[in-house]
Amino acid sequence: IIAWSDQWFAYLPDPKGTTEFGAGYASFFWAHNVFAEVLSLVVLIVIAVGLFRIIPGLADFARDLVNLYRREVWALMGKAGG
């Protein structure tokens, strides 16, 4: 909300080109949909790496889970291997 009202990112383009939500929507879009979501992804990755270091078995479990899903997707697509 502060990014919208204070126009923190008014110099960045409005990707939707809309004025439906009033002037300053570009600032809200960039603050919420880009910067906040990228920052939350970085924090999530840092937490995951920290947990993998603390609990090594968790990393093995995650790797096995990804491999399981990968094999299932390959099987659904009708491709051998994986």
Image (spheres, rainbow, N blue to C red):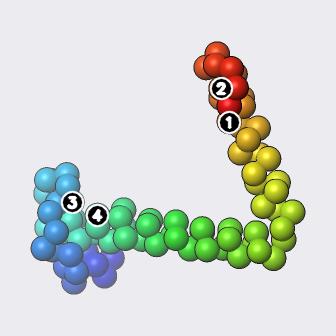
Upstream in sequence: badge 4 or badge 1: 4
Q: Position of residue 46 (x, y in %)?
A: 61, 74
Q: CA distance from mark 2 to mark 3?
A: 44 Å
**Nearer mark to the viewer, of 4 and 1:** 1
User: For mark 2, what is the residue?
Assistant: 74
Residue drawn at x 52%, y 70% is 42
Upstream in sequence: badge 1 or badge 3: 3
* Quadrant housing residue 50: bottom right
The foreground one among 41 and 78 is 78
User: For mark 1, what is the residue?
Assistant: 70
Q: CA distance from mark 4 to mark 1?
A: 34 Å
Upstream in sequence: badge 4 or badge 3: 3
Q: Which labelled disc corresponds to residue 29?
A: 4
Q: CA distance from mark 4 to mark 3?
A: 11 Å
Q: Which labelled disc corresponds to residue 21?
A: 3
Upstream in sequence: badge 2 or badge 3: 3
Residue drawn at x 13%, y 53% is 17
Q: Report the amino acid beneath label 2.
A: Trp
Residue drawn at x 33%, y 76% is 1
Q: CA distance from mark 4 to mark 2?
A: 37 Å
In-image side of 64 versus 79 (left or right): right
Q: Report the amino acid beneath label 1.
A: Arg
Callout 2 environment at 10 Å: few (<14), some (14 to 19), or many (20+)? some
Q: CA distance from mark 1 to mark 3?
A: 41 Å
Upstream in sequence: badge 4 or badge 2: 4
Callout 3 environment at 10 Å: few (<14), some (14 to 19), or many (20+)? few
Q: CA distance from mark 1 to mark 2?
A: 6 Å
Where disc 3 sits, the SS reads loop
Asked whether disc 4 touches disc 1, contact meaning CB atoms under 8 Å apart, the reply is: no
Is 10 rendered above or below residue 76? Answer: below
Is 64 rendered above or below residue 1? Answer: above
